[in-house]
Structures are given as structure tokens and as C-alpha cells.
Image (cartoon, rainbow, N blue to C red):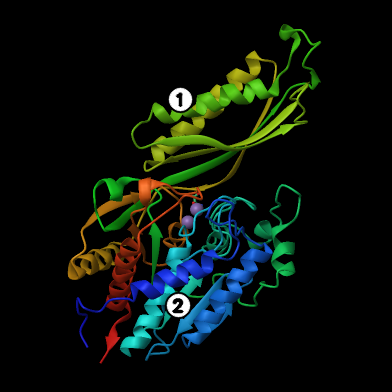
Amino acid sequence: MALEGNMRINGQRLWDTLMEMAKIGPGVRGGNNRQTMTDEDSEGRHLFQKWCEAAGMTMGVDEMGTMFATRAGTDPDALPVYVGSHLDTQPTGGKYDGVLGVLGGLELIRTLNDLDIKTKHPIVVTNWTNEEGTRFPPAMMASGVFAGKFTQDWAYNQTDADGVKMGDELERIGWKGDEKVGARKMHAMFELHIEQGPILEVENKDVGVVTHGQGLNWLQVTVTGQESHTGSTPMPMRKNAGLGMAKITVLADEIALSNAPDAVGAVGHCDVYPNSRNIIPGKVVFTVDFRSPSLDVQKDMEAKFREGAQKICDADGLGLEIEFVGGFDPITFDEGCVTAVRNAAERLGYSHMNIVSGAGHDACWINAVAPTAMIMTPCVDGLSHNEDEDISMEWATAGTDVLLHAVLETAEIVE
Ligand code: HGY
Ligand code: MN
Ligand code: MN
């Protein structure tokens, strides 16, 4: 059976499945708060496993809790083609970030069952643990361990704001599997994901053919001053760590803008101590997120930031510590897989364009150990990591149709 343009997924079933998952870990404004290693994360995992088993797949779980649902191929020795993304969300996340890639993979399997299509290579639908890295940094944690970028023990010992360890939470929610992380070998991997930016919608394209991913640096900054009374301490005597953070936040913005239009930078997290209305902050801990498609720019931004932050703190008599928390170099996806994605969009008649991923994804790490590519769908106003994140059923369907065809071209249909 050849790959035909009329082989398409069931868009309504995909949409209904997305809405069903969105009921787990609801946010406060219509999005989701299903953070990694929470009871809501576990509930979503159980629902995903139920759906996978109903579709005839067998579930494996590794020691980082990543879930691998397998549909057998006709050749048991053939390496599987992997799809998937992540079910964990930001604390004020949307319904589609990551989830579309996991449930789009499930829809692909449901469609193969409907069409009674067999493939030479097995197909595996994956839910990567802790892609967001917001509760337990860094982002793409489990896929990073899988690709050998972080050790498992280091990951287990990462703590959240309350000092709780990731490994302890993984045990508590009962999702620590027995498979050795990274033991699985892949024929290829495709990740479907919303763009999380405005380009595809502005360019009126159905599908993004992701050729590259920009690099990312997360730097944790600790500025120390002196706690003292906000009323009775004369201004010249103050060692205000909060003021230091404000100046360093502006510095990060200026460095990113000086590398426009591709580089970006922001402070997204900050903890002020003692965080009292009438005490000058004695310590502030915050994270700077720098990204660029160019490794040289990425390194230059970090160097300029370290130099500039030290100058600010020296001038204000403040202490400074900067710790590299996580990140990865810009990546180029596999030419063969990218071509399979482009062929799929052409065959299906979907408008498409090449695009560089602005966000980090599990595929960015898996690209280091297997031929990998990504498929992106537009999202409304380019908004993501916001409960108002929104996509259309048409966009979700087009992206998943392309995923179906790219995977079938790679997993080889058996007559
Ligand atoms: O930070 C990222 O780029 C991803 O959304 N975790
Ligand atoms: Mn994501
Ligand atoms: Mn995200």
C-alpha cells in the first residue's frame, strides 16, 4: 500500500482527546497547571497509558519515568520510529504545549489501526518526563539524561523551591520505571509541537518544517547586599540587592537587543529575601534565559553579561555569584528526517515553510543520539506559556497528518 494523500488522521478524535487531557490539572484561566511529578502529572500519565493500551500498544517506563508506548512492527529487529513530546505543563501553561505531540502520536496509532496499516519498523509514542524544567530545572531533563547530557543521579537530586528532590517525587507518584535510561536505540524520532511564536500564523502557513533549534543558556544569578530598614537607612548607605537585580535585568535585555533580531534574553524567575515590604532586600536569586541560533552570539551574550553584572555589583558594593544552570548549543536537525516532513506536507497539500525553533524541545537533545526532526503548527498570536495559548483543530489536524506521513515514509508500510 503506497502512501496516499488521502491517508489522514481523525481530527475530531484528536481534538476530543486533547480536550479530555486538558481536564487534568486545570489552570485558573482555561489552561493547565499539570507540573512535573505532581499528582496531576500522574493522573495524566495514567490516562495516557489507558488510551495507549486500548490502542493495542505495550507500555514501557524508564528510570526517569519517561513513558514509551510501542506498536509492533512486522520486523522485530528493526529499530523503532519514535514520536511524542511531553505531558507536563508550566504552572500557567496552555493545553497544547507538548500535549499535542504526545496525543498526536496516539492519534497516528489510532489511524494506523483504523486503516489496518502495518509497518516494518515498530512505532513508539513517548511522554518525556519533565520537559518544562520549571519545578525541577533544567528544561528537557529526562531527554537530556537519555541523551547522556546529564547524569541520572544529578537529575534525581535537583530540588524544587521547597527543597523537595525530583527523584523522591518520582518515587512518590509511582512512575519510576525499571528500564535503563538511554538503552533504547531509535531508527528516527519526530516531534510535533506548536510553534510557541507568531511566525507561522503571520506567514499564513499550515506547517513549520523545523530545520534548526536555537541554543539556550540558563544562568542563575545570586546578588547579595545587606538587609536593613527601608525607612531609616540613608540612601547612600544602602546595599540594595533588589536594585542590583533590577539593573542586571536591564543589562540582560540590552545584551539581547544588541544582537537583534535573532537573539533573545529575559529574567523569568526571581526570589527576593527576605521579601518584606519594609526591609531592603539582602539577597536576590534570579534566572536569566539567553537564546540565539548562533553559538558565537550565545557565548558572547554570556561573556558580556558576566562582565556587565560584575561591574554593576562592584559599583554598588554588592556580592555576585553566577551559576550555569543548564542549556544547549544551537542544533541542526537531520536532513533525511526534515525532508520526510517536507515531502509529507507537499503530498498532503499543506502550505509550509522552514523555521528555526525558538523554544527548546526534547527533540533538541534526542537529535544528538538519533536522526530527528520536528513539525510545528501555528498558534494564536504566537502565545504560549500562557493559559490563553490556543490553536485551531485544523492546525492540529494538519500537523498530525504531516506527522503520520513522515513516520510512514520512515517506518515503511508493509503491503
Ligand atoms: O524553555 C523551553 O524552551 C521549553 O519550553 N521548555
Ligand atoms: Mn513544550
Ligand atoms: Mn513549554
Q: Quadrant of residue 112?
A: bottom left
Q: Quick one: quadrant of the C terminus?
A: bottom left
Q: Answer yes or no: is residue 180 visible.
A: no
Residue at 32% in and 67% down: 397
> At numbered mark 1, what does the secondary structure look like: helix, strand or loop?
helix
User: Which of the pair 343/228 is nearer the observer?
Assistant: 228
Percent x, y of residue 134 = 60, 50
Q: Decide: few, some or many residues near mark 2? Use Cα within 10 Å; few <14, some 14-19, many ≥20.
A: many
Q: Quadrant of residue 238?
A: top right
Give the numbered dot on residue 124: 2
Q: Amino acid at mark 1?
A: Glu
**Disc 1 target residue:** 254
Image-based side of 37 in relation to 309, left or right: right
Q: Quadrant of residue 177?
A: bottom right
Give the numbered dot on residue 68: none
Percent x, y of residue 100 = 43, 64
Image-based side of 226 in relation to 254, left or right: right
User: Which of the pair 46/210 is nearer the observer?
Assistant: 46
Percent x, y of residue 197 = 38, 47
Q: Quick one: quadrant of the N terminus?
A: bottom left
Residue at 28% in and 74% down: 405
Residue at 67% in and 62% down: 38
- Placement of 282 over or under 154, stated as above or below: above
Q: Answer yes or no: is residue 367 visible.
A: yes
Distance from label 2 to label 1 (Cα)? 44 Å
Image-based side of 214 in relation to 282, left or right: left
Q: Amino acid at mark 2?
A: Val
- Placement of 397 over or under 33, stated as above or below: below
Q: Earlier in the sequence, mark 2 or mark 1?
A: 2
Residue at 19% in and 76% down: 5
